[in-house]
Amino acid sequence: MSVKINFVRGDEVLTTTMTVGRTMLDAAKKLNIPEIPAICNGSCNCGTCHVHIDSEWIDKIEPMDPGSMELFMLERSENFDVSRSRLCCQMDIYDVYEGLTVHLIDNRKD
């Protein structure tokens, strides 16, 4: 089963489908999104796949583990928002995520 995932860049919406059980990073890679370079290739070691969850989805997604490496990485980000920030590499896709919308942050390192 696949679900539709939306990545928002300003006024533009990039949409793809991704198989349940894969990660949001897999969906971002499928779209070649430059704002998500994922320098560590999904090992939760760089923070460059940071996105903000759309406000309508915050209560519908699997919560982040409070003691996780994901939270450790995000807390060091200048764009960290305790209620909306997630790393794509740490978000598994579930069937209930049909239509999930996330907002892009420019994670490219200069």
Image: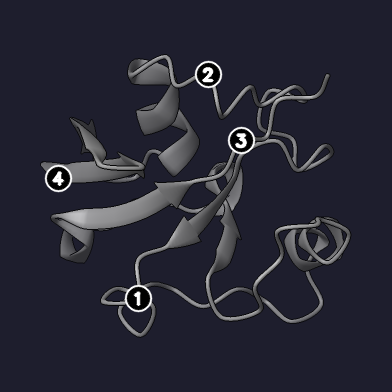
Q: Which quadrant would residue 53 be assigned to in this image?
A: bottom left
> According to the image, label 3 marks what residue?
106
Q: CA distance from mark 4 to mark 2?
A: 22 Å
Type of residue at label 4? Answer: Val
Give the image location of residue 42, x and y in percent: 66, 32
The colour style of the image is: one colour
Q: Which residue is pictured at 65% across the width and 72% down the height? A: 81
Looking at the image, tell me whether mark 4 or mark 1 is earlier in sequence order. Answer: 4
Looking at the image, tell me whether mark 2 or mark 1 is earlier in sequence order. Answer: 2
Q: CA distance from mark 3 to mark 2?
A: 8 Å
Q: Which label belongs to residue 34? A: 2
Q: CA distance from mark 2 to mark 1?
A: 23 Å
Q: Which residue is pictured at 88% across the width and 59% down the height? A: 76
Looking at the image, tell me whether mark 4 or mark 2 is earlier in sequence order. Answer: 4
| Residue 38 visible in image | yes
> According to the image, label 1 marks what residue?
55
In which quadrant will I find the C terminus?
top right
> According to the image, label 4 marks what residue?
3
Nearer the observer, 71 or 20: 71
Type of residue at label 2? Answer: Pro
